[in-house]
């Protein structure tokens, strides 16, 4: 009896934990939830900074009432060719960067996982260096490397009698150049994630596979990759969220919010900022933000369905 | 000759420990070649930044282009400092990043400890919610956040950078995983039965055990703040308040791209992190691998 009393006293004492998690939730409410809700709200208004200041000074609902335009921003968005172009570009850059990156990262991780590799910490650490570099610095260097006239890549192509490739002015080459910026920064990091996951695979699985006389490719295909399913899913999800928010690379690469002279690498987030902070069309920018969120949700559902399907196929 | 003493149990020490012989030669030279090539690709852009920055923009326009560092690096650094207060920007960034890291680690550790070890109602739902918030696209809230910052008169005020960043879902989740896996329940039960308050248990038992992981979280936070560009560029427009990333873009005001200056600025803005990385790189790598989703 004394013990139950003690336990419940401890449980009561534990409730102070609610106070410990409170900072996160209060902070999320103020700087996460409320901004998202109000930005969504703003998408229904013909809002610029002037309207906002007028409302904040007077708190007169009439000011807002006059600017209410219902779904007009969304209608405009639906027939805005730039938004659809931005959506296409965003997905193109995402696909060009993510798919080869995951394959190469897996390859590097397999090399690093060799237990006999010398200086393994040295290799791991050096591969992490690009990841601590800012996106901005990466974009500046790659802007030069892919420069049409004086860039490293076109110079090399010149020496083998090719090129020059229009790394900025043409759609696909510009997507490739931006994808290289993303991959350079994330390849080593993702290799380390794969490596950690590979090292966590139970040794017995490999031992029994080698007893069964499996080839190296068979071991990779039927032991390693199935064991990495959650890791791959996680990387695709994180990569997708990051990829759909792509913004700094194309901004620096093109030097403007246009995403190139013909908007050939205009991305969704770039278009949001162009409208909200360059043209000061806050309401329309908010509508673009809602559009991006819908895309993110749709992609997440697709991700989830594909993952579930692969998982169920595997258990057959 | 002194024999090295090992702290082994007697039975183990009595028997000679058999060390499995490493099978050398099972790593093909191709593996080292491939890894060496990856390291070359990782390192080359840094070298190239220095080559271009120290040669001036003219040198790279030549065929063949300059491939070794020149001697004009000092001049271009001087030029940058004449245009923007770059050292001030570095000081600003160190200040902001340090304050955010300290707050983030503290709040995350507290919340992570509560979510991992304390008996609270709705704990599971809270954790799911926190993970869910990580999926929200950050760009959606920025417009309203910017309006609030201008309403609060926090434009050009470091509070506009610090306050929205003092705690985040990633840190809380990370700390929960760490506390959950590194602190045995028995230790906490014992402390409670001894009559220690929850907070004292946290400070005296949990904090010392999670210090290394806290350090890694602090580093990640510091790097994230250092490298953040978007939000600072929106709320800072006074040159004396710039962070490093904003200062770098402020150099690029004309239509003609000055590669030497841009690359020098990018290098100056990255160098402090590279120096930091020399000391903490291994721990950072261990942290990344510890936090990886496995299986």
Image (spheres, rainbow, N blue to C red):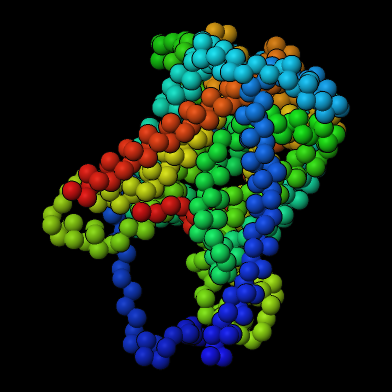
- Regarding residue A274, the answer to whether it shows in the image is no
Task: Please name whichever residue, A80 or A273, is drawn nearer the observer in this view of the structure.
Answer: A80
Residue at figure coordinates x 76%, y 30% from the top left:
B147
Query: For residue A202, what is the image quadrant?
Result: bottom left
- Regarding residue A90, the answer to whether it shows in the image is yes
Judge left or right: residue A253 versus residue B161: left
Residue at figure coordinates x 43%, y 52% from the top left:
B293
Residue at figure coordinates x 18%, y 56% from the top left:
A209
Query: Horizontal and vertical percent for residue B66?
Result: 60, 22
Q: Is residue A124 above or below residue A139?
A: below
Query: Horizontal and vertical percent for residue B295?
Result: 36, 54
Residue at figure coordinates x 45%, y 55% from the top left:
A119
Judge left or right: residue B257 versus residue A182: right
Task: Please name whichever residue, A254 or B31, is drawn nearer the observer in this view of the structure.
Answer: A254
Query: Horizontal and vertical percent for residue B199?
Result: 69, 72
Tell which residue pokes out farthest to the top in this image.
A262
Query: Horizontal and vertical percent for residue A175?
Result: 47, 20
Number of callouts: 0
Q: Is residue A254 above or below residue A199?
A: above
């Amino acid at each position: 009896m004394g013990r139950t009393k003690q336990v419940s006293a401890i449980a009561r004492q534990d409730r102070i934990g609610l106070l410990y998690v409170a900072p996160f939730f209060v902070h999320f409410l103020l700087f996460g939830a409320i901004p998202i809700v109000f930005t969504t709200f703003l998408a229904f208004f013909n809002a610029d900074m002037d309207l906002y200041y007028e409302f904040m000074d007077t708190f007169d609902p009439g000011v807002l009432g006059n600017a209410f335009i219902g779904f007009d921003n969304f209608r405009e968005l639906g027939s805005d060719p730039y938004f659809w172009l931005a959506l296409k570009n965003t997905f193109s850059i995402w696909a060009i960067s993510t798919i080869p990156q995951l394959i190469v990262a897996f390859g590097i991780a397999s090399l690093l996982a060799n237990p006999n590799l010398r200086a393994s910490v040295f290799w791991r650490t050096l591969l992490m260096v690009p990841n601590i570099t800012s996106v901005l610095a990466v974009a500046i260097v790659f802007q030069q490397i892919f420069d049409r006239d004086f860039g490293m890549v076109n110079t090399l192509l010149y020496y083998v009698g090719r090129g020059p490739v229009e790394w900025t002015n043409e759609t696909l080459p510009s997507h490739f150049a931006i994808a290289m910026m993303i991959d350079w920064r994330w390849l080593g990091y993702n290799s380390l994630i794969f490596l950690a996951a590979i090292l966590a695979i139970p040794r017995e699985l490999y031992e029994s596979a080698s007893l069964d006389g499996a080839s190296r490719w068979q071991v990779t295909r039927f032991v390693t990759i199935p064991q990495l399913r959650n890791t791959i899913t996680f990387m695709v999800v994180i990569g997708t969220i990051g990829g759909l928010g792509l913004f700094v690379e194309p901004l620096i690469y093109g030097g403007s919010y246009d995403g190139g002279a013909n908007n050939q690498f205009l991305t969704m987030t770039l278009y949001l900022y162009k409208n909200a902070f360059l043209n000061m069309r806050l309401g329309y920018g908010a509508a673009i933000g809602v559009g991006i969120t819908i895309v993110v949700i749709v992609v997440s559902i697709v991700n989830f369905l594909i993952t579930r399907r692969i998982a169920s196929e595997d258990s057959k | 000759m002194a024999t090295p003493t090992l702290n082994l149990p007697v039975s183990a020490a009595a028997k000679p420990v058999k060390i499995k012989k490493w099978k050398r030669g099972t790593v093909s030279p191709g593996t080292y070649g491939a890894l060496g090539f990856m390291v070359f690709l990782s390192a080359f852009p840094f070298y190239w930044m220095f080559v271009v920055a120290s040669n001036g923009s003219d040198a790279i326009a030549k065929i063949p282009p300059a491939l070794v560092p020149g001697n004009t690096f000092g001049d271009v650094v001087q030029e940058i400092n004449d245009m923007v207060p770059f050292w001030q920007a570095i000081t600003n960034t160190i200040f902001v990043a340090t304050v955010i890291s300290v707050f983030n680690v503290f709040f995350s550790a507290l919340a992570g400890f509560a979510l991992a070890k304390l008996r609270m109602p709705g704990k599971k739902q809270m954790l799911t919610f926190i993970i869910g918030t990580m999926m929200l696209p950050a760009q959606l809230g920025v417009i309203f956040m910017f309006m609030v910052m201008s309403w609060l008169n926090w434009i050009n005020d470091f509070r506009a950078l610090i306050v929205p960043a003092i705690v985040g879902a990633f840190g809380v989740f990370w700390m929960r995983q760490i506390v959950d896996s590194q602190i045995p329940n028995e230790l906490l039960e014992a402390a409670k039965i001894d009559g220690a308050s929850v907070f004292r248990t946290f400070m005296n038992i949990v904090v010392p055990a999670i210090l290394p992981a806290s350090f890694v979280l602090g580093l990640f936070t510091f790097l994230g703040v250092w490298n953040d560009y978007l939000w600072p560029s929106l709320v800072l427009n006074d040159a004396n308040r710039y962070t490093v990333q904003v200062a770098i873009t402020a150099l690029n005001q004309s239509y003609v791209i000055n590669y030497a200056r841009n690359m020098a600025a990018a290098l100056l803005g990255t160098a402090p992190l590279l120096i930091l990385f020399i000391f903490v790189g291994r721990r950072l790598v261990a942290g990344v691998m510890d936090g990886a989703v496995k299986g």
